[in-house]
Image (spheres, helix red, strand yellow):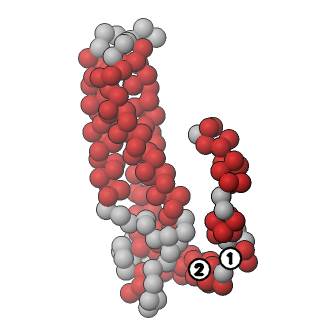
Amino acid sequence: MLLLALAAPTVWFVLPENLQNRYMTIIDPSRGPANAQESVEGRWEGFYGGIAVWERNFMFGVGPGCYTRETGSPIQTHNFVGQVLSELGSLGAFAYLFLIGCVFVNHIDAFFLYRRMKREGRGKDGVYMYQVSFAVLWTVFLLLFLGTGSHNAFRPIWVWYGAFQGIAVELLRQKANALAPSRV
């Protein structure tokens, strides 16, 4: 992460100007074409529309994919928060946040288990499971990042990511526990 943070300014300055302007439209729509301004306004409309639907269906929401049916809008919210709250409601948003939290906590567990295995000289036995956990963590992070301006909040694959990571961490735990007691 530190390396990426340090490399970001360098990458920014080697990008062609058209790509720099495209990324700048995220915070300053005037840097891009007129459709960039329309896109930003549409995402804000999706956010406010999602909040309005959530207020009417506070506990359970209207169901995945039903935002357009509820509002009569021809398009989805294209806003992560608006979509999650309107379609899942408060209960579903809590479950969604819980799933994301589990992915992060599971990876922390995998990190310490793998580190223990490496200390015992058995890192190669757990490297694959650790890499699965790491890949799931980064995939969820990227989907969250991209979801702030999109509508990818409801991909059924998110549950599969959690399941694959959970299996990998449990297998890593079993392998680590099979070792001699750790010399901590």
Which of label 2 and label 1 is nearer to you?
1
Q: In the rendered structure, which amino acid carries the disc numbered 2?
A: Ser
Crowd around label 1: few <14 · some 14–19 · many ≥20 (10 Å): some
Q: Position of residue 25 (x, y in %)?
A: 67, 71
Q: Position of residue 139 (x, y in %)?
A: 43, 51
- Residue in the image at 71% along x and 49% along y: 9
Residue 27's quadrant in the figure? bottom right
Asked if residue 136 is positioned above or below residue 183 in the image, the reply reads: below
Q: Which residue lies under the disc numbered 2?
A: 39
Tell me the distance, in whole angstroms, between the alpha carbons under discs 2 and 1: 11 Å
Q: Position of residue 74 (x, y in %)?
A: 44, 89
Per the rendering, the mark at residue 32 is: 1
- Observer-nearest of 136 and 62: 136
Q: Position of residue 155 (x, y in %)?
A: 35, 64
- Residue in the image at 29% along x and 52% along y: 160
Q: In the rendered structure, which amino acid carries the disc numbered 1?
A: Gly
Residue 181 visible in the displayed image: yes
Quarter of the rendering occupied by the N terminus? top right
